Image (cartoon, rainbow, N blue to C red):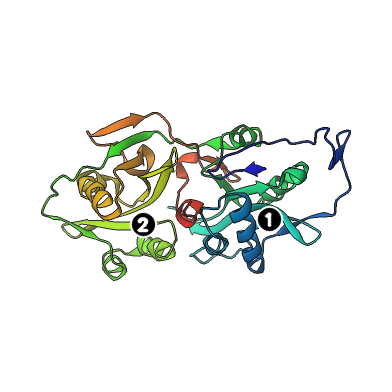
Amino acid sequence: MIFAAGHAFTLFLPFPVVRTGGIIAGVPVAQNVLTLPITTDDLSRVGEFLSVHLDNSLTPGQWAHSLRPTWTTSHPDHGFLLESDGLVVGVYAAFYSETRTADDRQRAVCNLAAWCVLDEFRHHSLRLVRAMLAQRDRELTDLSPSGTVVPLNERLGFRHVDTAGALVVNLPLPTRRRVRLLTGRADIEAVLSGADLAAYRDHADSPAARHVVAVVDGRPCWVVFRAVRRKGLRLFASVLHVSDRDLFRATAPAVYRHILLAHGLPFTLVQTRVSGPGPWHSVPLSAQRPAMYLSRTGEPPESVTYLYSELTQVPW
C-alpha cells in the first residue's frame, strides 16, 4: 500500500515486480483501471477508501468532510482516483485554491494531500502522479510528504521549503495586561480587516485549524495552529500562520499559554519563516517534517503558505 501526506509510507515501486496472482514476469495482468477526477459526488466513497486503507482515526464521513475545502475555488474537483470495475483502488486527493500575491497577482495552487493505492494496483500509482503534474496552470505543494515520497518529489523537480524552527514548551506564564486574546468568530471578525479577514473567513470552519487573535493597543495578530501527533502522542500544536511576526514576538507567551490551558497541548512547534525565532524556553530545530514545492512561475519556496491546504483541513 502506498501512503503519503504525513502517514506511514510502506512501499513505493514505480514499476511492477515479479509476483504471482496479479503480475506475471514483471507484466501486469490486464486490468480495466481508469484514472478519474474526484468529483464532489465521489467524496463519500473516497472517504470510505481512505478510512479503511489509509487512516482509520478518521471515519469515512470525516474524511469526506475534510476533503471539501471551506474556501471558494474555481476548480470543481478534489484530486484523482483509480477505479477498477467500479471500485476505488487508489486515491491522490488534492486541495485547490486561488489567492492574490503581495503584488496583486493571482496564484493558483494544487496542494497534494492523501495518497493511497492498494498493493495489487501499485503499478498504476504513477498515473496519479502524472495527472497531478499535468496541471501546468498551478503551483504544486506537498506539505507533509512521507519519507519515501521525498526523493520521488526531488526527482520530479520539487524544492524543499525551509522548516527550521523550534520546539516551544508552553508555559503558563503571566501575560501582559495589555494583551487581549480573542477566539470567538464575531470578536475575531471585528478586529481583522482586508486580506486577513478574507483568509480567516475562508478557514473559520476548517476542521483542523484553530484560531486565536492577540490584540495589543488595537493591533491584531492572527495565529492559526493545529494539533499534531509525534510518535503517536497528540501533545503538540503546530503554528501554520502568523499575520504579524513582529507583534507575535510580543504576544507569543499569551498564545502559548492559551494553547496549553485551552487546548491541553504542552508543546508548540514553530517555524522561523512562519512566526519568527523561538523564545528562550524553546529547543532549536534545524529542520522539521519536510514540506515541498514545485513552482511553474518561479515563485520562491519561502512564499509557500500552509493555509489553503490539508494542514488546515484534515485533522489526522
Which of the 4 quarters of the picture holds residue 155? Answer: top right
Per the image, the residue denoted by label 1 is 80
Q: From this viewpoint, is residue 227 visible? A: yes
* Residue 42 position in % (x across, y down): 66, 65
Name which residue lies at 19% across and 60% down. 218
Name which residue lies at 29% across and 43% down. 266
* Residue 1 position in % (x across, y down): 67, 43
Name which residue lies at 67% across and 53% down. 91
For the residue marked with disc 1, what is the amino acid?
Answer: Phe
Q: Nearer the viewer, residue 192 or 306?
A: 306
Left or right position of 164 against 37:
left
* Residue 271 position in % (x across, y down): 37, 39
- In the rendered structure, are the residues bearing label 1 and label 2 in contact, judged by CB atoms less than 8 Å apart? no
Left or right position of 116 against 199:
right
Packing grade of label 1 (10 A; few <14, some 14-19, many >=20) is: many
Name which residue lies at 52% across and 67% down. 72
* Residue 57 position in % (x across, y down): 51, 53
Residue 304 - label? none
Which of the 4 quarters of the picture holds residue 278? Answer: top left
Per the image, the residue denoted by label 2 is 210
For the residue marked with disc 2, what is the amino acid?
Answer: Arg
